[in-house]
Image: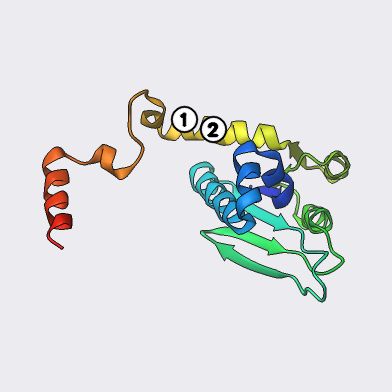
């Protein structure tokens, strides 16, 4: 049995506060950050992730598919919505596979129920990702623990790197 998570990309990005703030400055950056998060989720959970972005307002857009860090990313064609792509994929996947659709779009949620898929709201997806991170990386949640590389380097290594940096 293969588990799939089909994600309405812009719907989720616009629903998560951390990414919503990023959109104001740079939509591309928010999209890349979101794909990084989904790539980590796929690697940690073993669930096959497909993220669909609406491009139906792009004139003469032909749509495209690409793999980004192991995640299948679909940009819809002109006149085609993310909902349409997700519904089509959900209808094509054979029995014995599990499909979850992540969206906060109520109409989309009702449609995927009819295809036998499970729905996950934007908030529920965010909580599931946080829980998975906590399970796989409990040290990240400890107070006072730095999460960057500097927080993991030995003091002697830091001093050596600092000397190298200042030699320039």
> Mark 2 packing: few (<14 Cα in 10 Å), some, or many (20+)?
few
Q: Check disc 2 and report its element: helix, strand or loop.
A: helix
Q: Position of residue 140 (x, y in %)?
A: 39, 32
Tag 1, which secondary structure?
Answer: helix
Give the number of the disc on residue 64. Answer: none
**Residue 129's quadrant in the figure?**
top right
Residue drawn where x is 67% and y is 32% of the image: 124
Q: Residues within 10 Å of mark 1 (few under 14, many from 20)?
A: few
Residue under pointer 1? 134
Coloration of the structure image? rainbow
Please give the label number shown on residue 130.
Answer: 2
Does residue 99 appear anywhere in the picture?
no
Q: Where does the image place residue 157, in percent across and percent down from the top left?
A: 14, 46
Q: Are marks 2 and 1 in contact (CB under 8 Å)?
A: yes
| Residue 37 visible in image | yes
Distance from label 2 to label 1 (Cα)?
A: 6 Å
For the residue pair 1 and 136, the one nearer the viewer reads as 136
Q: Residue at x 77, y 59 (%)?
A: 54
Taking the image as shown, residue 41 lies to the left or right of residue 88, namely left
Q: Residue at x 59, y 46 (%)?
A: 47
The x and y percentages for residue 142 are 37, 24
Position of the C terminus, as image quadrant, is bottom left
């Amino acid at each position: 049995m293969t588990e799939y998570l089909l994600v309405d990309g812009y719907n989720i990005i616009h629903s998560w506060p951390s990414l919503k703030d990023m959109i104001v400055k740079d939509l591309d950056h928010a999209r890349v950050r979101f794909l990084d998060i989904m790539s980590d989720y796929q690697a940690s959970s073993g669930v096959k992730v497909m993220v669909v972005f609406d491009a139906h307002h792009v004139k003469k857009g032909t749509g495209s598919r690409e793999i980004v860090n192991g995640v299948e990313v679909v940009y819809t064609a002109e006149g085609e919505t993310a909902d349409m792509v997700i519904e089509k994929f959900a209808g094509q996947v054979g029995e014995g596979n599990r499909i979850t659709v992540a969206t906060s779009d109520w109409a989309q949620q009702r449609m995927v129920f009819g295809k036998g898929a499970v729905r996950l709201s934007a908030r529920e997806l965010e909580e599931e990702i946080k829980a998975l991170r906590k399970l796989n990386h409990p040290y990240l949640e400890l107070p006072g623990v730095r999460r960057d590389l500097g927080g993991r380097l030995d003091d002697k290594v830091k001093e050596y790197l600092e000397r190298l940096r200042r030699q320039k």
